[in-house]
Amino acid sequence: MAAERTQEIVMGLNGNEAVAWAVKQCNVDVVAAYPITPQTIIVEEFSEFVANGEVNTEFVPVESEHSALSACVGAAAVGARAFTATASQGLALMWEILYIAAGLRLPIVMAVVNRALSAPINIHCDHSDAMGARDSGWVQLYVEDSQEAYDTVIQAFRIAEHPDVLLPVMVNLDGFFLSHTLQDVRILPDEVVKKFVGTRDPIKIKVPYLGDKEVPLVLDGETPITLGPLALPDYYFEHKMPQVEAMEKAKEVIKEVNEEYARLSGRKYGNGLTVAYGLDDAEAAVVLLGSAAGTVRYVARELRREGYKVGVLRIRAFRPFPVEDVVEKLSNVKVVCVMDRAISYGARGGPLFMEVRSAFYDSPEKPIILNYIYGLGGRDLPPAVARKIFLELLDIAETGRVKQLINYVGVRE
């Protein structure tokens, strides 16, 4: 491991550039994309790699995000490794194709630079875009910093193309907080990454009209097969169940890829599904996604130095949701605050809150679980606010009194 790590170079990159570098090294066949703030730098940077002859990738500049993902669907269906990137309204415009990509079991990787959805128009971060797509059948991974963005895109190709998964993977990074913020990023050598991701090797299927001859599950122009045929009530349900099974199997694959990548790079993100801090003896804990985890963990460290027993659980894989991890790591905590950077209108709390609370429904040992919705439209989460939240949780842990289940943080009255 040490020999591998000494080969890395350190580059000053923002999150978008880190993603572009990862894609550059992953032997991608087709990149189809359309620019949208704050994602544009990813495809802009990658198009320069193509123009300079640094990659052997077909770059397809299209007229919309709907077309970008459609082009990736076509490329992946013929056996190519495909990538795209988008944000906010662009992800919303892909809506129809998100479900098609997942239903066809195409291992496309897409970087989503999380940005609020209109209206009103806002170009800054929250998670409303990806949360709107949470039931589309894509694996959803959320990163905390630019280094993890680089590492996770590389891992995503292995996860998506694993024969037990074969689902598209969405790598989420917070708009501007990560996409436009410079950070030292450790870059692995090209040959090391290419060996790690390998080449896409489509699974084989038996073709009855050829005497059960095995052929790759791709549209090769020679062996007629059908992808995405009409399925009426007598078959549609059965087509959906393999997606359910693949998403469940993705949990172990994400863990395995995380471990293998750690041996390669020395960098490990919890068990791949969740990243825990201070939970062994915590009385109060915060659960959240994305870049704000760094701020919250910083505050938790400060409070622990002062003698307070607090912890943080960052959810890295929102889909598949790590129910077992969440219950195991939070069962002994007295009070849990789930922080959502999105609203689920008309529901009792945000999307992450509902997942965490549901996970504990059948558990005999369960904490008090509150919801704090924060940071919509890019509003910051200062350390002072995170500290206040922790102190409120500790007070509840001591008194058992909950004043309000759903809380909105930092809203002007």
Image: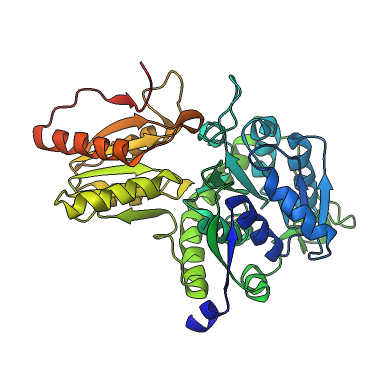
- Quadrant (top left/top right/bottom left/bottom right) for the C terminus: top left
Apparent side of residue 238 relative to residue 293 in the rendered image (left or right)? right
Horizontal side, residue 397 vs residue 241: left or right: left
User: Which corner quadrant of the image does residue 210 belong to?
Assistant: bottom right
- The one nearer the camera, 78 or 314, is 314
At which x and y percent is residue 409?
35, 28
Q: Residue furthest right?
A: 222
Nearer to us in this view, 309 or 272 = 309
The answer to whether 231 appears left or right of 50 in the picture is left
| Picture quadrant of residue 117 | top right
Q: Position of residue 49 (x, y in %)?
A: 77, 60
Residue at image position (56%, 43%) is 241
> Going by the picture, which residue comes out furthest to the bottom?
3
Q: Is residue 79 visible?
A: no
Counting the numbered discs, the total is: 0
400 to the left or right of 162: left
Residue ranking furthest to the left: 399
Query: Where residue 401 sits: x, y (%)?
Result: 14, 27
Query: Is residue 316 shown above or below 12?
Result: above
Above or below, 128 against 242 in this view is: above
Q: Position of residue 169 (x, y in %)?
A: 60, 49
**Is residue 142 visible from the viewing direction of this image?**
yes
Identify the image quadrant of residue 29: bottom right
Residue at 17%, 49% (x, y): give it.
309
Q: Nearer the viewer, residue 354 or 247?
A: 354
Which residue is pictured at 71% across the width and 62% down the height? 24
Q: How is the image coloured?
A: rainbow
